Image (tube, helix red, strand yellow):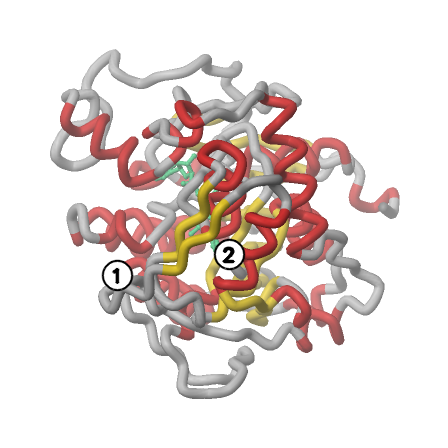
Amino acid sequence: MSSAFVRRPVLVTGHRGYLGSVMAPLLVERGYDVVGLDVGYFDDCSIAADPLPIPSIDKDIRDLVPADLRAFYAVIHLAALSNDPIGNLDETWTEEINHRSSVRLAELAREADVRRFLFSSSCIMYGQSSAEIVDETSPLDPRTLYARSKVKSEETIRDLASDGFSPTFLRNGTVYGLSPRMRFDTVLNDLTGAALANQRVVVYGDGKPWRPVVHVRDVAAAFCRVLEAPLSLVHNEAFNTGADHLNHRVIELAEIAADLVPGCDLEVRGEPGADQRTYRASFEKFARAFPDFEFRWEAASGAAQLIEDYRRIGLDAGLYGDRRFVRLRWLNHLLESGRLDGSLRWEAGAAGGERQPEGKG
Ligand SMILES: NC(=O)c1ccc[n+]([C@@H]2O[C@H](COP(=O)([O-])OP(=O)(O)OC[C@H]3O[C@@H](n4cnc5c(N)ncnc54)[C@H](O)[C@@H]3O)[C@@H](O)[C@H]2O)c1
């Protein structure tokens, strides 16, 4: 990294989630002065220790004030209700947290002269595309509240771009790989977890839908790469974040997972009501913009690494089936146990986990 970037202050929202707890330490390693901002929904959901303490603003993104944004060079915005099923809990939460708060964060960042704004978006916004392969110019077909929240956020934040404010939209594929704040509700984490913990991989549909899968450490590195790119390359641009060879049919991923564990069964149920979301993404634009960037993990090598990581942390059926690692189940638990109230806010004294010292902001 060039010395021009050393110790630049970066705010990472959602830094205590699956992606953030890998990305924030990587940014520190690369010389950034990282401050996180997170409400801590998953603070009790660690599967492994955090590699580094990250100074943190413990705050709901719905409660931002201008002072939270002062003095940052860049914002990396990960905080969100992070998948489709959570949108079904209560429509207003996904709208408020994922859409309105993202826009307000971008507005405050722009007012505070934050130079760059990296928005963690998703290829899911292409929906069940009829196009053979979707690229950044393809029509969007968001089928869920979650996907719509990403589309609406991108659209509104795009209008905020100016000479002094450069948003970039990183449309990730489905992320996998070990993170301290693990999720088993993403496809390859789930399939490999089932293979090792249950010696049984079940595909509920016919396995034909396509998914681009990208390793969490590659996603973290790709965000760093975009953060360091010349502004002319990334100003107000959307990028599918991944590589063409990372598009797989679900059945291929299931076979990869099952083959890694001796004696593992693979069952394809072909249930008609199963998840048929499908999209095959083109990652050409990313490759053209960053020809030197390498996605280091392929599905097969990444899954093999993941199985190794699972063995190291002692993954068994209990841990794999634990509600702490399925976002919807954990949020439901916090709601049912009265720790979160009906607007998804902590009841007094109910927040979990170990808090790091307050950072700037
Ligand atoms: N994991 C994937 O496969 C994937 C794929 C595409 C896009 N994304 C996007 O990347 C981002 C990170 O995903 P993830 O997998 O790390 O999700 P995650 O659920 O593990 O982490 C999200 C983090 O945001 C925080 N958060 C949620 N609501 C908040 C609020 N109101 N105020 C403050 N903090 C709040 C949570 O506490 C959590 O730490 C999300 O925007 C997600 O939509 C993820």
**Dot 2: what SS?**
strand
Is the residue 245 above or below the residue 104 in the image? below
Residue 316, x across and y down, in percent: 48, 25
Location of residue 312 by image quarter: top right
Callout 2, which amino acid?
Thr
Where's residue 287, x and y in %? Answer: 73, 71
Q: Which callout, 1 or 2, points at the residue further toward the start of the chain? A: 1
- Give the Cα distance between marks 1 and 2: 17 Å
| Residue under the image location 32 percent in, 56 percent down | 99
Viewer can see residue 39: no
Foreground: 264 or 101? 264
The answer to whether residue 131 is left or right of residue 331 is right
The residue labelled by disc 1 is 145
Above or below, comparing residue 149 to residue 143 in the picture: above
Q: Nearer the viewer, residue 340 or 245?
A: 245
* Label 2 C-beta lies within 8 Å of the nearest ligand 1 atom: yes
Q: Looking at the image, which residue sits at the far right? A: 2
- The crowding category of the residue bearing disc 1, from other C-alpha atoms within 10 Å (few below 14, some 14 to 19, many at least 20), is many
Single out the mark in the foreground, 1 or 2: 2
Q: Is residue 108 left or right of residue 273?
A: right
